[in-house]
Amino acid sequence: MESSLALSNLQSSYFLAGNPNRADTHRMSAQRRDPVDAIIGQWASVRPDLDTAAMEVFGRIFRLSRAMGDRIDKAYATFGVARGEFDVLATLRRSGEPYTLSPRQLSATLMLTTGGMTGRLDKLERAGLLRRSPDPHDRRGLQVTLTEKGLKLVDEAVGAGLAVQTEALKAALNDEQVGQLADLLRELLTGTETS
């Protein structure tokens, strides 16, 4: 049974007719509507008292994250790693030579529990992409080091992931818009992480 709110059941004029006093209607392009516009229109119809500006922003961020996450997952899968595993390799790569960090440093950077990190490290070590060894400065500690195979893989995978992201940006935005968007998202992220 189809939902009565399915987009295909709504006339196109439904989305154009909204509340003319809504503050966000001037931002909607007549040519480029997206599913978030439909959701905002539905809320305006049933709850015109709501200020849905935050929903317009975060709804799009969530949808972009999911869509791009799926595309990036496919790019990394061609190298035999999932995104979480790529994140471990990339963190080691970004640390610079000798590409070595402790499991605790990796966990903190990636915001993972030590148990979650152990599973990723086990899989990556079995694949020969990293190695664990005793920490020479801490008898109880370990250090995790990227292998040559891991270095080669992460360098290729990061290029593939960036190509997917760049393609998506260039399909929709010019360079100036990309810079503006990056600046605005930085402000939003900084504001939410400090509040």
Image (spheres, helix red, strand yellow):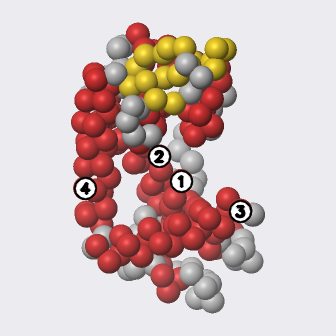
Image quarter hosting the N terminus: top right
Q: Residues within 10 Å of mark 3 (few under 14, many from 20)?
A: few
Please provide percent x and percent y for residue 26. Answer: 50, 86
Q: Nearer the viewer, residue 156 or 138?
A: 138
Residue at 44%, 68% (x, y): give it.
182
- Dot 3 or dot 1: first in sequence order is 1
Q: Is residue 133 left or right of residue 90?
A: right
Furthest toward the top, the residue is 126
State the CA–CA distance, disc 3 to disc 1.
20 Å
Identify the disc placed on residue 66: 2
The CA distance from mark 2 to mark 1 is 6 Å
At x 66% / y 67%, what residue is drawn? 191
Q: Residue at x 45, y 54 (%)?
A: 64
Of callouts 4 and 2, which one flags the residue occurring earlier in the amino acid sequence? 2
Amino acid type, label 3? Thr
Looking at the picture, which amino acid does disc 1 mark?
Phe
Above/below status of 46 relative to 81: below
Left of 129 or right of it: where is 171?
left
Cα distance between the residues tagged 4 and 2: 16 Å
Identity of the residue drawn at 74% across and 77% down: 49
Helix, strand or loop at label 3? It is: helix
Q: Secondary structure at mark 4?
A: helix
* Residue type of the residue flagged with mark 2: Arg
Mark 2 neighbour density, 10 Å: few (under 14) some (14–19) many (20 or more): few
Query: Residue 171: x and y, percent?
Result: 25, 63
Of callouts 4 and 3, which one flags the residue occurring earlier in the amino acid sequence? 4
Residue that carries the numbered disc 1 in the rendered image: 62
**Residue 96 shows up from this direction:** yes
For discs 4 and 1, the disc positioned in front in the rendered view: 4
Residue occupied by mark 3: 194
Does residue 147 sit above or below 111 in this rendering?
A: above
